[in-house]
Amino acid sequence: MSPVATLPSRTPMDAGVDATGILNLIDALEADPAQEPHGLMILRRGAVIAQGWWAPYTADRPQLVYSLSKSFTSAAAGVLVDEGVLDLDSTVVSHFPEFADEITDERTRRMRVRHVASMASGHENEMIDVALRTDDVEPVRGFLLNPPEQEPGSVFAYNQPATYTLATIVHRLTGRTLVEFLRERVLDPIGAGPIAWEEWPEGRDIGYSGAFMTTDTIARLGLLLLGRGQWAGRRVLSQEWVDAATSVHVDTAPAPERGASDWSRGYGFQHWRSRHGYRGDGAFGQLCLVLPEHEAVVAYQGQSGDMQRLLDAVWQHLLPAIGRAGSAGADAELAARLAGSSLPERVVARVAVDADRWDGAAFSGAADGAESGDSGDAGGHGARVRRDGDGWVLTLTGSTGDVRARFTGEPGWCVTSGDGPVIAVSGGFAGDDELLLDVAFLETPHRLHLRFDRAAGVVTRRWQTPPLRDPADLRDLTAPGAFG
């Protein structure tokens, strides 16, 4: 893998953008309790005009992008289509001849690669749980053994096994993982940094989610798409593929609702159409937003509880600023603002406590309480606190093992990396018997709120946004070991 070259940069004013619009966007995101920005890059006319990361998140640490992974699976499929190796009109079953005798449903046998690429398999609902119940060893088989309710190509349903099937076809045709294939054919040509992808089964990247990457890598994919497949004079994807992948192949909402949200404008090949441009997106606010009419790309990573409001903020504040006269003063203010960005820490009226009373304290997980019982509940697992030099070590018990992180009890974030997830902790002692901490898992969007009651021996745990997988799998909140 070649070293990552820095993308070119310009001031917003030089790129024809009023920096006050970007400042207003940042203000809106930071003021909205449903939004927590982690990383932002805005590009126009091939150059970065604004970029920043909210400490303790950093530019160089890959993070989980959830379903934004699908846009990279699309790029891998596009390379094979461009080369004539993959025919979008070939049937899905033809790529899995070992299942052919079992697949007797005529609709399933008519399902084509273009249908799974566009979430139009004919199924009316998400099929991941059904597929796994049918076959938890080979999910493609489990998917294909459940006939679609409608004719393939006629109806949209966001459907993880459809993308998984597409990714498996790419894997079979190339004999390599998605990371390996993309590294040679897409990632290196556009100068992207390392990425990792969750595998299942071992040796097969899951395709529909599970990719870890930096904001910069997201931005580079956006620039490649904006350039209709061309990068610095080199053809990486065909113009025909990019146009097809980002066009509507299936409606995503009934006609009366079309335009009501950015999820009702249609779906391409693993890309959403938006009110403006198109995008790849992942849960909790992972975005690669391409705006051809504005010659712009927005790459974003964060923790969003309302992604429509996130997009609304971009439409309201950024778009009017593109093409509007700016100023050097606003550019300087924006650069300083982004350079000093940080996440709010856990607010605690800190008090001095008897350290000996807390050292070695063990806590059971709360079964109920003021901070549990909702969809973000993470109760039921214990914790320990012990002294360590001039600070403390927090141990959290998860269903897949313990994780450990340091904290100081003083203002600021304390970051721990090593064996297990990279974790940042803020907060402190709010009373003789009360400890309040926030735990950010920095390779993911997620933050955990903790309240320790020493007198009761109980810790209450609540996710700000619960991970999509079992939120008790704390050791899984980290990137896979190998980066490509």
Image (tube, rainbow, N blue to C red):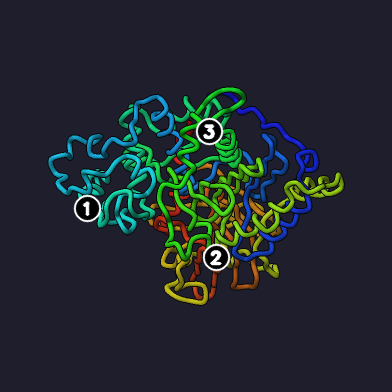
According to the picture, the residue beneath numbered tag 2 turns out to be 450
Between marks 2 and 1 in the image, the one whose residue lies nearer the viewer: 1
In 3D space, how far apart are the residues under numbered discs 2 and 1 (Cα atoms)?
42 Å
According to the picture, the residue beneath numbered tag 1 turns out to be 146
According to the picture, the residue beneath numbered tag 3 turns out to be 194
378 lies above or below 42: below
Q: Residue furthest front?
A: 255
423 lies above or below 364: above
Residue name at image x 64 percent, y 67 percent: 429
x%, y% of residue 430? 65, 70
Amino acid type indicated by mark 2: Leu
Residue name at image x 70 percent, y 67 percent: 350
**C-beta proximity under 8 Å, tags 2 and 1:** no
Amino acid type indicated by mark 3: Pro
Q: Secondary structure at mark 2?
A: strand
Amino acid type indicated by mark 1: Asn
